[in-house]
Amino acid sequence: MTINAMSQDSLQSMPYWLAGPGARASTLPSYEVELAGFHRAFECELQALLRSLPLRPTMKVLDLACGDGFYTRRIADLLGRGGSVTGVDVNRAFLSCARAEARSQTGEAHLDFLEASFDALPFPDETFDFVWCAQNLFSLPSAHAVLRHVARVLRPGGVLAVLENDTMHQVVLPWPVALELSLRAAELKALWDESPDPEKYYIGRRLAAVLAAAQLDPIRTVTLAMDRQAPLGGPERDLLQAYLDGVEQRVAPYLDQAGLHELRQLSSPPPRSTCSSNRTSP
Ligand SMILES: C[S@@+](CC[C@H](N)C(=O)[O-])C[C@H]1O[C@@H](n2cnc3c(N)ncnc32)[C@H](O)[C@@H]1O
């Protein structure tokens, strides 16, 4: 079977999310707030990304490990009568958010959500024209296994689109170069100590090779940089703060005292102004 694959690497402000044995859960994972924040902060870019996909109105689409259905709903909007998109995930809490949000969906395409694991997809072989898989390969146990199961349900000539990031460069800030280097070295040590498979955290840079190893024919690789300048909006500020807090926690045991002090100074939120001119009169 020949399958066309399209990979999309992205360089963006996004934390890395770990899905452990608790992934099949009835509560939302702790990273949900950051994930939703990421969707909010980069809604425009993510919409543009989806619009650039080779989707056709009547396609049958699978959104694998769909989370809260952010992408599933937007893909449904890009399809038309006769088209369908199915979001699959193991997390019931995510699925119930996804179903609740989908109630206000007004498009013509069919949209549904199903509880299933990527390695037990309840679909016959060659069911889908298109599979979308966002921010999952680095968190699921084995990218190779995911791609094997995707290949089974994708029709010959169908398209797989993968969106991944690269933990080492998920946020590029204008901080001092020396701090950047020592921080990334500390982060790398932390990831190697934390995980038996640390390479998955920089799957973005290896995506073309990972897809080729799964015998998927590459169509296109796109690196997407999402740029923001100060003053940041609320969603971007919240996301950046959450990212900095997470990085500090991760690298603290691996960074020297001077580096940690510098990082803490740079990542502390500025004190809120108490200036009377900022207050509104009653
Ligand atoms: C980082 S989230 C990404 C969610 C979504 N794709 C997005 O970008 O918004 C990873 C998702 O993988 C799901 N997941 C974890 N293990 C899974 C499995 N075995 N099969 C299907 N989904 C799984 C989680 O519940 C979670 O929704």
Image (cartoon, rainbow, N blue to C red):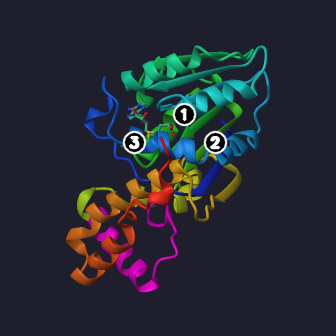
Element on which disc 2 rests: strand
- Residue 178 falls inside the magenta stretch: yes
Residue drawn at point x = 52 percent, y = 53 percent: 236
Residue 37 picture location, percent across and down = 49, 44
Q: Does residue 59 appear to the left or right of 186 in the view shown?
A: right
Q: Quadrant of the N terminus?
A: top right
Of mark 3 and mark 1, the one earlier in the sequence is 3
- Amino acid at dot 2: Ala
Of mark 3 and mark 2, the one earlier in the sequence is 3
Residue drawn at point x = 57 percent, y = 50 percent: 211
User: Of 145 and 186, which appears nearest the observer?
Assistant: 186
Q: Disc 2 marks which residue?
A: 161
Element on which disc 1 rests: helix
Residue 225 picture location, percent across and down = 63, 61
Q: Does residue 219 appear to the left or right of 171 in the view shown?
A: right
User: Of 205 and 212, which appears nearest the observer?
Assistant: 205
Residue 130 vs 236, above or below: the answer is: above
Label 3 CB sits under 8 Å from any ligand 1 atom: yes
- Amino acid at dot 3: Leu
Q: Disc 1 marks which residue?
A: 150
Q: Disc 3 marks which residue?
A: 140
For the magenta stretch, what is the residue range? 166-191
User: Of 166 and 177, which appears nearest the observer?
Assistant: 177
Gap between marks 3 and 2, in whole Å? 16 Å
Gap between marks 3 and 1, in whole Å? 13 Å
Q: Does residue 29 appear to the left or right of 218 in the view shown?
A: left
The reply to whether dot 2 and dot 1 touch (C-beta < 8 Å) is: no
Residue drawn at point x = 44 percent, y = 30 percent: 118
Gap between marks 2 and 1, in whole Å? 11 Å
- Amino acid at dot 1: Val
